[in-house]
Image (cartoon, rainbow, N blue to C red):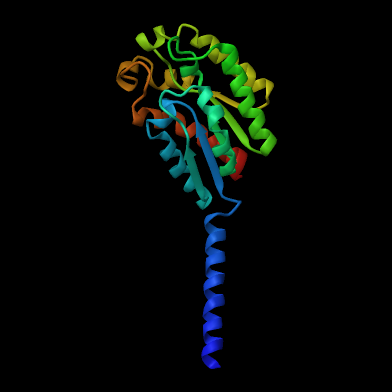
Amino acid sequence: MRSFFYLRKIKYTVCFFLVTFSSFVFSEDDLKIVTLGTSLTKRGNWVASLENVLGKYKSANVNVLNLAISGATSNEGVEQLDELLEYKPSVVLMEFSVNDADYFRGISLSKSLNNLDYIIKTIRADNEDVTIILMIMNPVYGIRSWIRPMLGEYRYRHMLLARKNNIEYFDFRPRWMDMYEGNFKKVIPDGLHPTSRAAESVIVPVLKGLIVNKCLN
């Protein structure tokens, strides 16, 4: 009889531990971030750096799901919506202008705008409290710029779309100019992809400020 109650006590102790541990790991209060975009988000290590920096702020439990794909356009962003919604993010970071505007592998401006609008509205329909940040990443020069003759128009229209949908928008190019003007060949050696260190120095402080202000204060 005594052994029965002893085993029962162990059972409830283990169950309590598992429930408590599960609540800690998968708490709805965790800050979950999803990134959608191109190689400018997939590469460069700034996403991991952002996760680390945010995790040190008030000991927040931060988890980032990086869905960015090298070579992706906003078509891929639309296809990833089910996976994104299943993750239940608090924040979505998104950038597609540089590949949508590619003359050879991109998509039309109207298709780009329709895709982004659909992504934003689908996320909002699932959870209207999600913070969505549409980003313009970095200057593009040389042949990488030549094959994107309408990139400026895509960027401008993406900005207008962000305003129309009342989401956050940030263009990192002025910050790149302030920090690295005259050194782009060193920090963006192929004309498109920044070095990891440079990308972290430009992007992470800005996104940390935006996300802390929106979600962690």
Image mark count: 0
Left or right, residue 45 beside residue 5: left
Pick whichever, 162 or 52, lies toward us: 162
| Quarter where residue 123 is shown | top right
Q: Give the percent coordinates (x, y) of residue 26.
A: 55, 54
The structure residue drawn at horizontal position 55% and vertical position 44%, both measured from the top left corner, is: 32
Q: Furthest residue to the bottom?
A: 1
For the C terminus, give its image quadrant: top right
Pick whichever, 44 or 183, lies toward us: 44
Pick whichever, 6 or 140, lies toward us: 6
The structure residue drawn at horizontal position 47% and vertical position 15%, both measured from the top left corner, is: 106
Q: Work out whether 83 lies above or below 39.
A: below
Q: Is residue 142 visible?
A: no
| Quarter where residue 165 is shown | top right
Pick whichever, 113 or 174, lies toward us: 113
Q: Give the percent coordinates (x, y) of residue 27.
A: 58, 54
The structure residue drawn at horizontal position 53% and vertical position 23%, both measured from the top left corner, is: 75
The structure residue drawn at horizontal position 65% and vertical position 31%, both measured from the top left corner, is: 122
Left or right, residue 7 beside residue 45: right
For the N terminus, give its image quadrant: bottom right
Q: Is residue 87 visible?
A: yes
Q: Give the percent coordinates (x, y) of residue 183.
A: 33, 17
Q: Give the percent coordinates (x, y) of residue 11.
A: 54, 77
